[in-house]
Amino acid sequence: QVQLVESGGGLVQAGGSLRLSCAASGSIFRINAMGWYRQAPGKQRESVAVITNGGSTYYADSVKGRFTMSRDNAKNTVSLQMNSLKPEDTAVYYCNIDLFTSNFRRDDYWGQGTQVTVSS
């Protein structure tokens, strides 16, 4: 079993910052790519940022220059630093981790989601 626990969401004014974290635990052999996704009310879930196991990062155009993703392979954690937040960033944010379990099965897991609300 693998568990993902997210933290760090909240309410912030436009222009403010938040940092999201996601920690994976359980029967993990190796973590591959890690990603952050978000879903706003009435909209489909969209990719925000992805980081490969080599450390390469990819960002949605809407967050480039404002969001920074990082990972700590030793702790099986991934973070998303969000600066210059805008009201349109308001959404539930989910982490997603692609990994090999300890019995070498490849699968991906989702966090429980954390609410980010940016007021104007």
Image (spheres, rainbow, N blue to C red):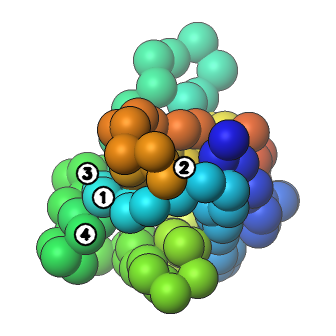
Amino acid type of the residue tagged 3 in the rendering: Ala
Residue 53 point in image, percent of width and height: 25, 69
Compared with 107, 11 (above or below) is below
**Residue drawn where x is 83% and y is 59% of the image:** 11
**Residue drawn where x is 54% and y is 73% of the image:** 76
Distance, label 3 to label 4, CA atoms, is 19 Å
Residue at label 3?
60
Distance, label 3 to label 2, CA atoms, is 15 Å
Q: Secondary structure at mark 3?
A: loop
Compared with 52, 43 (above or below) is above
Residue at label 1?
32
Mark 3 vs mark 4: give the one in front. Answer: 4
Quadrant location, the N terminus = top right
Q: Secondary structure at mark 1?
A: strand
Distance, label 4 to label 1, CA atoms, is 5 Å
Residue at label 2?
95
Amino acid type of the residue tagged 4 in the rendering: Asn
